[in-house]
Amino acid sequence: MHRRFARSTALVALAAAAAAPLTAAQADRRTVLDQVDVPHNYYFREMYLPQLTSGPAALAWSPDGAELVYSMQGSLWRQAVDSGVATELTAGPGYDYQPDWSPDGERIVFTRYDGKALELAVLELASGEVRMLTDGGAVNTEPRWSPDGGRIAWVSTADTGRFHVFVGDFADGTLRGGRQLVPEREATVERYYYSRYDHELSPAWLPDGDALVYVSNRGVPYGTGNLWRHDLDTGEQVLVRREETSWRSRPDVAPDGHRIAYASYLGRQWHQLWVTRMDGVAEPFPLTYGAWDVGAPRWSPDGTRIAYVANEHGDNEIRIQAFVGGEVTVLEAAERRYRGHMGTLALRIVDTEGEPVAARLAVIGSDGRARAPADAWLHADHEFDRAAAERETAYFHADGSAELVVPAGRATVTAWRGPEHEVVHQAIEASAGESRSVTVTIPALDLPPDWTNWVSGDVHVHMNYGGTYRATPATLAAQARAEDLDVVFNLVVNKEQRVPDVTLFSPAPDAVANAGTLILHQQEYHTSVWGHLGLIGLDSHLLIPDYSAYPYTAAASWHPDNVTIAELAREQGALVGYVHPFDAPAPDPSAGGRLTNMLPVNAALGLVDYYEVTGFADHRTSAAVWYRLLNCGARIAAAGGTDAMTNYASLRGPVGLNRTYVRAGTGAATPAARRDAWLEALAGGASMATNMPLVGVAVNGAGPGSVIEARAGDVLRVSGFLRSAVPVADLELVYNGEVVERFEAGTSADVEAEIPAGASGWLLLRASSPPTPAVLDQYPYATTSPVYLTVNGEPPRSPDDAAYFLAWLERVRAAAAAQADYNSDAERATVLGHIDAARPFYEACR
């Protein structure tokens, strides 16, 4: 996905008339905890920062080893290890995470999220009183008591916006003298996913209290770093274990002070528990084995057991494993005793005929906190507008029904079922100690008669990507059903050395395919320079390695480039797309700095079939670059791809948020035939991309992807429609990048226009609006693919756009020629040859 990479090549604003500026309201939708000054927030937020989940998360032992405290559904819970009864210790006002039990057993330190920051707090167990320990507005995580209870170590972004270990003194219920353990230090190596400044994560005390173990990426180009021991008196730092980690190692030191348990994906696709020794020379051994994630390990006080969190069955569960013998018990919260007065809601979700339907639901209790069934996966939006909400939207998917516990009082339910249905808001009164049955009806929009021929798909999904949950094709299909999504492309892709879901790749539709959902496991190709490619319809094998141009690795060469990869994909019959193209500002080839995105090269050589106009990028900026390519004669279909990691709790999504509709008809009988029809329609440009509004256009009766022959001055008769569950402010007909007609919009419109044929080129219909909480994206946006127009038999020409891309090619070529990491002169010559081969296309456009 790597949306933020686009920003590294986007150096100055694009002077394109079609790229409308963001309004002040649009600029207010910002990433969660955006005070963290670290790139790729989508990764560290999910894999490092605490998340709101229905299942249990971070945990800690009581000093006597008889109980655990853990976070679950945003509260802290206490449970004896030999009991099925969980007792809620905190219940807001924010969401509480990452508890640690004091050595004297009297209090628990934790971190609380209020929508603005993560602050440290302490709970006095005897009184139930909670006192805040920090209030500076930073992100404070992973608090750990010293063995004598007189100090707390934690990680904070205070002052720098980056993650560093702090240590402070705790006395009389307050935290004093917090100091950053390691001074800010700029890295000496080039980094892609990580800050140019070093960080320290996940502190754990040694039993004598004189030293800490933590994770640091000092000198590390990829991964979150190695395990280090830090002597608090002398400041000496000793390397304990050199290993590429990925945010989730969370080392814990055994009571004997010699062993460290930590989570690692060493040589595997999933995080498991490993144990190494403090001496820095021992090779680790695995403590757990499985095709699922294990993390958050904590040794019992006597060192005989390790408690941890595992997602084998999808959501998290706590397991306690004997270190010797390996016996595992699951700590199940069979009975939950809440702090407040609670009621039960039994929701039934139906269509207007009363038939059960799957849907996405957001339930907010009378306490203002998100609620979900105990067995549901809670997801939270990755951005939100602070003027519209205190916290980001949290939601879950339900297959026709859902039962959940909520505080007594007024609860609100919001229900979505994809762009073809209304967004429903419903208020419900919950009574303490009672269960209430409630029906939520989701009406369909009044769609045009031809709509039955349109089939929806998300061309960019990652089923598993190092997130909280463990997804399967069945869970992916269930999410797609709730979003009323017909086709899902699960793109197999690397995250550093791992390639999650690599074993699922297949040319054939997944076995879960049925009349409602088609799951296809295909590929996203990663490079750190050229831009990322979606490869859908591969009929033989994945392209390996799945990435190139990774400095300090054996894949450092800038070959294979995106032209080489696209040609290999085409040999397998695949469509090639550029995914999450550009944030604002977009590339300006006249500016200085390095520009390497290879989009105009592939486009010139006819090696781009689709383009994510709606996706994990700025839609208007992405569209502006697309318009320039169309103006030069490229024929590239509009697509929508969410780049959702379906196993994330902090989900950029949900699946199908950005989707592609194609006019594929409904005649295909088998999953393979449905796949082929969908891909053929996209290849032909019969598509529309959206995140909520539905739009369609025809010119002289011909739809998107068609080519119209005309003479200059001929009247072009345009018809179109809009249907939307949210109001649309702007409904516009675009001709060669210029708006030629604006229509009254709202939520439903059927429009007609007559325009004279001018220059050869293209026309499309687009819709957009300011942000709304009903659409979990930057702003509502939709566009048809173009209807192409040939006037007087002439090809399209646009001198300004031709000059723009010729300057772009010069910048790309200069960067490629200066690169020293090719494996051979032949590789360099191949890459430069591809760039040079693109020039005639744009020269002909002048």
Image: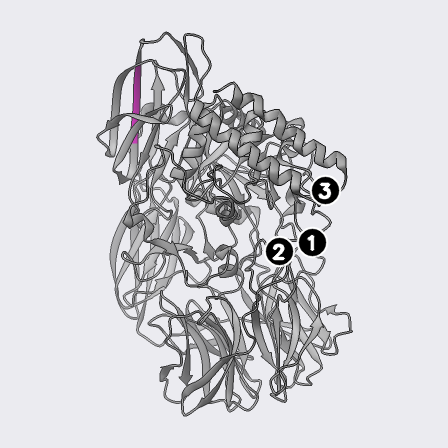
Q: Residues within 10 Å of mark 1 (few under 14, many from 20)?
A: some
- The numbered disc on residue 290 is none
Majority secondary structure in the magenta region: strand
Residue at mark 3 = 822
Going from the N terminus, do you reach mark 3 or mark 2 first?
Answer: 2
Q: Can residue 271 be seen at all in this image of the molecule? A: yes
46 shown above or below 139:
above
Label 1 with label 2: CB-CB less than 8 Å: yes
Compute the Cα span from label 3 to label 2.
Answer: 17 Å
| Residue 300 picture location, percent across and down | 61, 81
| Residue 381 picture location, percent across and down | 40, 54
Q: Nearer the viewer, residue 65 or 539?
A: 539
Question: Tag 3's secondary structure?
Answer: loop
718 falls in the magenta region: yes
Amino acid type for the residue under numbered disc 2? Glu
In the displayed structure, does residue 540 sit left or right of residue 515? Answer: right
In the displayed structure, does residue 690 sit left or right of residue 534? Answer: left
- The numbered disc on residue 190 is 2
- The numbered disc on residue 552 is 1
171 falls in the magenta region: no
